Amino acid sequence: MDSQLYDFIIIGAGVAGLTAGQYGARSGLRTLILDLSTSGGQALHITILENYPGIFPAVSGTVFIKDMEQQALSFGAELKQTTVLSIDKIGQTFILKTSSGIFSSYGLLIATGAAHKFLGVPGEKEFSGRGVSYCASCDGPFFREKNIIVVGGGDSACDEAVYLSVLSPHVTLIHRREQLRAQHAVAEKLFSNRNIRIRYNSVIKEIRGKERAESVLLADVHTGMETELPADGIFIFTGMIPRTELVPMLPVDEGGYIKTGDKMETHIPGLYCAGDVRSKPFRQLITAASDGAVAAHQAEKYICSIKQTTGASL
């Protein structure tokens, strides 16, 4: 089967991928963005985006992503919803087998992001969609005035707890450590919110219920003492797992995130990584956008050098 040839292919249509698509297409590269779902990634879960420079007043993550997508398309990037099955490299060309056919390119960017971690406790899988959720903006309105549990201690958990506190005055944040991991400004909003209580040094041992979730069994991490709390909605934000399954040949850090150089490059010429899948000290929308811009800039220089060497049209 013949492949469709592009200059630059991006896997992942989150903030990093869409930024790279915009920069790649704007520089004259025939650019294709592939994703198994709709554009946006984790940004779609943001109810109010208030800390992205230049975006003021705040907008929702959905509006932000829609604008990014339209901007990338306006410069000529193509966007296709498909599942990438495998990646190979023959000579100087990357070959991607997908559920929609075969695509090839001289430059390739992995911007596949990261997925939510699961607690792995009894009841989590059984009550998924029936009280257990990983998206407050998606499911929060179903739990107005109900007992809500939020699990986690980072930015996402705190942001979502604050959002849920508008829907219900009965929000409890469960965190396994003695202090939160969230940024100071994010945590302060939580501390000042009268609708939110915090249970430190606690973990969920089980999610209980009949047809739907009804309670959670907590355990103190130091004493082991167990407590049962009523819970109609359990929102889990305990971290992320980088989506690296397409590139097992690339080195990763202790968290499983792909190692790159400052130019987003890997040890394979023409292969770049950007966004939440990449090893870095700070993961925010703005750092994902920065990664995508740098990766596209470096890919453009690499691709042009390949075309000059091979005589392909620029």
Image (cartoon, rainbow, N blue to C red):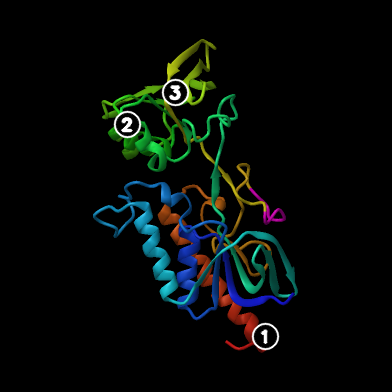
Q: Amino acid at mark 3?
A: Glu
Q: Amino acid at mark 2?
A: Arg
* Residue 239 position within the rendered picture, expressed as x and y whole percent measured from the top left: 52, 38
3D distance between C-alphas at marks 3 and 2: 29 Å
- Which of disc 3 and disc 1 is earlier in sequence? 3
User: Is 101 in front, or is 212?
Assistant: 212
Q: Amino acid at mark 1?
A: Thr
Q: Nearer the viewer, mark 3 or mark 2?
A: 2
User: Is 246 in front, or is 286?
Assistant: 246
Q: Nearer the viewer, mark 1 or mark 2?
A: 2
Mark 3, Cα crowd under 10 Å, few <14 / some 14-19 / many 20+, is few
Secondary structure, magenta segment, majority class: loop
Residue 309, disc: 1
* Residue 67 position within the rendered picture, expressed as x and y whole percent measured from the top left: 36, 64
Q: Residue furthest left?
A: 57
Reading the image, the residue beneath label 2 is 144
Residue 246, disc: none
Residue 178, disc: 3
* Residue 258 position within the rendered picture, expressed as x and y whole percent measured from the top left: 61, 52
Residue 53 position by quadrant: bottom left
Q: Do residues under tags 3 and 2 come within 8 Å of each other at their CB atoms?
A: no
Regarding mark 1 in the picture, which secondary structure is present there?
helix
